[in-house]
Amino acid sequence: MGGVLICEKPHAQGHCEYAVYQLDTCYDLPPALINNAATFAPDGEAFYCNPYMSPQGCTMGPVSFDYVHKFNLTAVGWNKYITSFDCHRNQTGTQAGEGE
């Protein structure tokens, strides 16, 4: 649990990196993707991630497998802001970010 695909362009295009991250730990984006991530797509397991502008700073809110814009953060203007993120297990049976 905790796999996230991060790419510089929408729809998983351009430079991409995929890794499985420990939950409840803050990570910096890979250097090539800092402030340059238009795809931020968590795997389909019961967890969500909070992308941040700075470590533990402002967040766009929870992003899960069900988040509408996970493959196109340009739609919400966050493709130029993400520098770090953390991921957490869902506390209920629903996915964070549903229907947003």
Image (tube, helix red, strand yellow):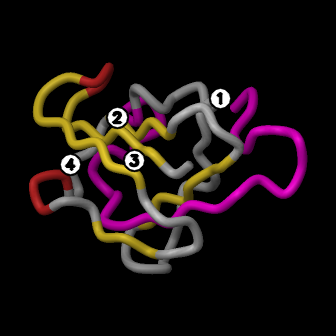
Q: Secondary structure at mark 1?
A: loop
Mark 3 and mark 4 lie on one chain; the one further toward the N terminus is: 4
In the image, residue 100 sits, relative to residue 25, either above or below, namely: above
Residue wearing tag 3: 78
Which class describes the residues within 10 Å of circle 3: few (<14), some (14-19), or many (20+)? many
Residue 23 drawn above or below residue 43: below
Instruction: Estimate the x, y position of residue 35 in percent, counting from the top left.
Output: 23, 56
| Mark 1 vs 2, N-terminal side | 2
Residue 35 vs 25, above or below: the answer is above
The amino acid type, in three-letter code, at marker 3 is Trp
Q: Residue furthest right?
A: 92
Disc 1 target residue: 66
- Amino acid type of the residue tagged 1 in the rendering: Asp
Q: Secondary structure at mark 2?
A: strand
Q: Which residues are magenta?
A: 73-100
Residue underneath mark 2 = 39
Residue neighbourhood size for the residue with mark 1, other residues' Cα within 10 Å, grouped as few (<14), some (14–19), many (≥20) = some
Amino acid identity at mark 4: Asn
Question: Residue drawn 84% across and 39% down?
Answer: 94
Main SS, magenta region, reads: loop
Nearest-to-viewer mark from 3 and 1: 1
The residue wearing badge 4 is 36
